[in-house]
Amino acid sequence: MLYQQIAQNKRRTIYVMVGFVLLVMVIGMAIGYVFFNSAIMGVVMAIIIGGIYMVMMISQSTSVVMSMNHAQEITDESQAPELWHIVEDMALVAQVPMPRVFIIRDPSPNAFATGNDPEHAAVAATTGILERLNREELEGVMGHEMTHVRNYDIRLQTISLALAAAISVLVNIGMHSFWWGGGRRDRDNEGGGYLQIIMMILSVLVIILGPVAATIAQMALSRNREYLADAGSVELTRNPQGMISALQKISTAQPMKAADASSAALYISDPLKNKHSFSHLFDTHPPMEKRIERLEQM
Amino acid sequence: MLTTIIVIVVIVLIIAIYAGIYNGLVTARTHTQESWSQIDVQLKRRNDLIPNLVSTVKGYTKYEAGTLEKVVALRNQMTQIPAGDHQQMMEVSDQLTSSLKSIFALSENYPDLKASQEYTKLMEELTNTENKIAYSRQLFNSTAANLNIKIQSFPSNIVAKVHHFVQVDYLEVPETEKAAPKVSFDD
């Protein structure tokens, strides 16, 4: 059950990731077609901008994310012995190096992991989670975070953040050139009119809907990863009950005071506790009941 | 001419594959040794902590000499076990774990002891060590499984036989621990 779930999630992630890259290219193509008269130029632009963003994010993600979430690093085990020891334990069984450890002063129980790879990873926990959860539950939570680290979810998150940012920059560039008198010049408006109009409408639709699709893809990616990390945590601790009661405690708590919205997907549970009543498309996390249900089936 | 080249290529290929398999076996064996030394470090650490625990507890409790003596006796027994005997080491370690649990249980009757800072610190240290023993044991078993699979499966079993790689025994988890795998003194 556990291993099937992991394999299935890994496959899905690849599909979503490929879709994401294609989406960036299609948006680039549409922008090129509408604003610069050349679809190929748009694709090239998309690849360059996407690449630059990825390099930028990957080189400095940890410090950016940690300061956006007001996290303070602890460098010595005496500052938070229980947390430090649990992170050590989880790094040991997950066979990854000890990550950097951060604490966020917030009464709401939550935690997240970030970084580029297991060698440059960091985990953060709120003071609320340290107070409310007992050792077994905290082990479950840290096992969840360590699974994100071990499975390179942290890098995937970073890359998808970068691609989402690249899409918004692409759209901005297109809009700018449009307002500043660039845009498509009608040099061949004789003949082939219908096809051109259809292409034009399609392209504009892609440009408008693209960023929305990017958000949805990013969220879907994140949701799958949460199930996988829950499963991975149990694989490390061999203790589903700890994880279940941790999730129960976390789900009943109040939202965080000052969580950064763009890193919401990183947390173990949605720190903003958005109530999207009409659909779950924009949720960064699967519903808590479903996560607990899957854990109970193990 | 062509056949000589083919023969040379085949020989080089076989040597390369053989070397790769051999190196894989050495790596797997080193991993099991490393993960055993993880356990060993924690066992030694616990042995170092026990005298502190005993002296702290003694200061607060007067009638529990028997429980404390048992812990000390087991600790001394552990230091006598030859380093290679993993199974016996783990057996005594399990007994030590359960008698340490009884010390922590008796501390419930002594509020002064429970409240003392020294004791709280020791308790975190010992809990940490106990958990690390459990986790490094889990790690040892998975590295052992990795090595054993290589020794049994084709074609690495041939290389293993030639170079006398032997299978590593798994560390048995006692029945009581299977029910509640992690020690948690602070609940």
Image: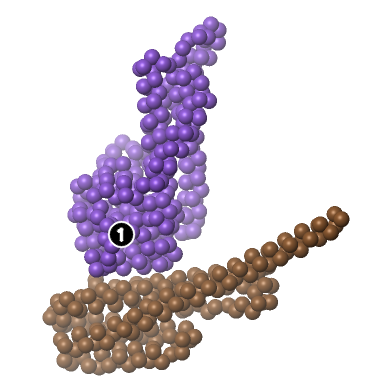
Chain colours: A purple, B brown
Picture layout, residue B103 above or below residue A159: below
For residue B174, side relative to residue B72 (left or right): right
What percent of the width, then of the height, locates residue B66?
A: 25, 93
Residue appearing at x 47%, y 54% in the figure: A5
Which residue reaches farthest left?
A: B112
In depth, the one of B80 and B187 nearer the eye is B80
What percent of the width, then of the height, locates residue A155?
A: 42, 49
Picture layout, residue B99 above or below residue A5: below
Which chain does tag 1 point to?
A
Residue appearing at x 35%, y 17% in the figure: A179
Q: Mark 1: few, some, or many residues within 10 Å (few <14, many ≥20)?
A: many
Q: Amino acid at mark 1?
A: Val
Which of the 4 quarters of the picture holds residue A136?
bottom left
Which residue matches tag 1? A101
Task: Tell me if residue A38 can be seen.
Answer: yes
Residue appearing at x 35%, y 91% in the figure: B76
What percent of the width, then of the height, locates residue A83?
A: 28, 64
Which residue reaches farthest right?
A: B1
What percent of the width, then of the height, locates residue A190?
A: 53, 6
Task: Tell me if residue A160 can be seen.
Answer: no
In depth, the one of A158 and A289 nearer the eye is A158
For residue A284, side relative to residue B1 (left or right): left
Which of the 4 quarters of the picture holds residue A169?
top left
SS of the residue under disc 1 = strand
Picture layout, residue B139 above or below residue A177: below
Q: Quadrant of the C terminus of chain A?
A: bottom left
Which residue reaches farthest front?
A: B1
